[in-house]
Amino acid sequence: KTLRNLCITGCNLGVKAFIHISRGLAQNNTLHRIDLNCSEQTAEYSEQVGNEHVRMLCPGLVANRGLQVLDLKGTQITNSGLRAIELALRTNYHLRSIKLNQPFFEEYIETGTGSTWWKICCWMHLNELNRQILLLPDEDVDTSKWHEVLTNCHETGDTNAIFYFLRSKPELCEMFY
């Protein structure tokens, strides 16, 4: 049997506990969702998940190949914690959704073009478009997969994603001749 969802809300876990969670995450590829959501009810009774907690979790995010949703709603994460997540997402091809809605979100987190949050959204969007295909050896990927990925990018009007895939794999340009 495998664990698919892990809910750690209101458990009053300290930063050190997140080191252990990270180690487990690095070895687990079946977990699809981690919920660290801190509701108003649990926040007053437990230690709030913040930047240091997230920094301890990120080594596990780098190694994990199954997690798709990270729920951080109501946490105390700021740009500092998001930078750690963004660095992990550079090599994590599977995480597709980070839920984040702190009170006064715009006051604590920059959201404009080029910001850390913007980069996180870009990485997750590329993951949704099947960025993991770049890891596969050429002989294991038929051209129809690449055509599907680039068609999805085109249909969403995402020229940044098209550029990313073509820059990462320039030989794809030959596919269209």
Image (tube, grey):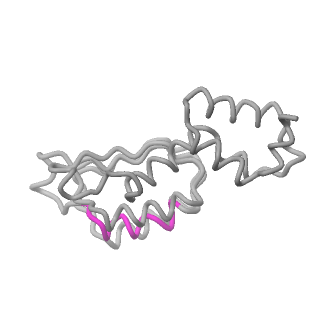
Is 119 left or right of 134, judged from the image as shown? left
Q: How many marks?
A: 0
Placement of 129 over or under 103, stated as above or below: above
Q: Which image quarter is the N terminus in?
A: top right
Placement of 35 over or under 19, stated as above or below: above
Q: Position of residue 128 (x, y in %)?
A: 56, 38
User: Which is more toward the observer, 57 or 6?
Assistant: 57
Q: Residue at x 15, y 49 (%)?
A: 103
Q: Is residue 27 visible?
A: no
Q: Place residue 21 in its image quadrant.
A: bottom left
Q: Position of residue 38 (x, y in %)?
A: 22, 49
Placement of 56 over or under 106, stated as above or below: below
Is 131 left or right of 104, judged from the image as shown? right
Q: Residue at x 83, y 34 (%)?
A: 176
Is 35 left or right of 59, judged from the image as shown? left
In the image, farthest residue toward the top = 155
Q: Is residue 119 visible?
A: yes
Q: Which image quarter is the C terminus in?
A: top right
In the image, farthest residue toward the bottom = 16
Q: Which residues are magenta?
A: 49-61
Q: Place residue 140 in its image quadrant.
A: top right
Is 128 left or right of 9, judged from the image as shown? right
Q: Main secondary structure of the magenta part?
A: helix
Q: Position of residue 59 (x, y in %)?
A: 50, 68
Reply yes or no: does residue 149 show up in magenta: no
Q: Position of residue 50 (x, y in %)?
A: 26, 64
Q: Residue at x 40, y 65 (%)?
A: 83
